[in-house]
Amino acid sequence: MASSVMSTSSRSSGPQPPAAVSATGLRKSYGDKVVLDGIDLRVPAGSVFALLGPNGAGKTTAVNILSTLIAADGGQAQVAGHDVATAPDGVRAAIGVTGQFSAVDGLITGEENMLLMADLHHLSRGERRRTAAELLERFDLVDAARKPAATYSGGMKRRLDIAMTLVGSPRVIFLDEPTTGLDPRARHTMWQIIRELVSDGVTVFLTTQYLDEADELADRIAVLNDGRIAAEGSAEELKRLIPGGHVRLRFTDPAAYQHAASALRETTLPDSRLRPGRAIPVDESLALQIPSDGSQRELRSILDRLDAAGVEADELTVHTPDLDDVFFALTGSAATLPDQPKENAR
């Protein structure tokens, strides 16, 4: 990766799972505009990988290169074991792509859309009928199958779009902004569909601006900014890159509060940002705020010190940065989403 990349990957002596998608030094420019500036990617098979970034960051360009729709200017990439430049037919046979804009033809029925896609995959007459029927049932579209797709809701069109993508039994699916414009119920339905695909062994490469979507679905997340991968890791690993996490302890007994404050002030926790004097009284609410990354180790250390002092908090709350904070810190762009909860009461 470029030198600016922050990676939270842990090194392991064991073998890594095979990569369904990999790229090294991928570059793409349009005139003087550098869209991808040497990005590296590795997506393990059977996982969900989310590529985040502000508008114009190059997310769709990356998907278009990996799905062989456009050529890269430099670098190498493989999808499902096939080189995108030298074996594009092998890549196309192994993938499905659902773009930002629906590929559904609104002038024909949902069933006809499915049969048309089956024809494009050269399925036999019996296979095309069976495949279409199975997928329409799987995506709860049987009742609407013989209605024009133009009459479908946004969520129904998106489900039909993905059903059409699955006609060829792809091993890797690229979902480019799959829930844009959907209402919350339709978005959650789409999330469940994605989980089911992965449970069947499909690899999902997801681009999205919905940070809660990436948080909910992705095994690993990469943040793309100014043509480079700014950071990569699991959602929890990325959140720990951002300062501001803390544990808040509230007491109803003033004496317990004072004992806890003394115990935590006098103790230095190993490998922790808590140092003597860092337990801070909050107003007059008998609360202490202790810097913490929210990890189990740090939380256990704090509670062990309280147990040793014979003190029990009446309320413990862990505050951790969310992906909105990560996105803003890494890209300088405010996320276009409702705020995510930053407190998890324990």
Image: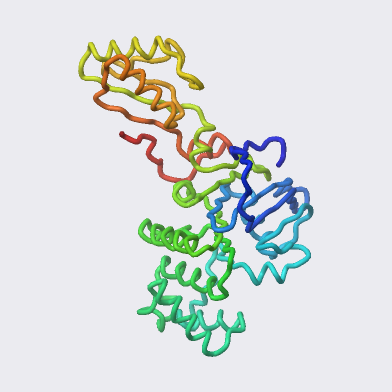
> What x and y, as percent, mark residue 243?
50, 27
Above or below, 41 relative to 242 = below
Q: Residue 95 location in percent, x, y?
A: 61, 67
Which of the 4 quarters of the picture holds residue 249? top left
What scheme was used to colour the molecule?
Answer: rainbow
Find residue 129 and report its horizontal and vertical position in percent.
Answer: 49, 86
Classify residue 168 by image quadrant.
bottom right
Tally of marks: 0
Kindly identify the residue that appears in the image at 52 percent across and 63 percent down. 201
In this image, 334 relative to 21: left or right? left
The quadrant of the picture occupied by the N terminus is top right
- Classify 139 as above or below 133: above
Outermost residue on the front side: it is 14
Residue 324 percent across, percent down from the top left: 48, 39
Closest to the observer, 153 or 317: 317
* Snapshot quadrant of residue 84: bottom right
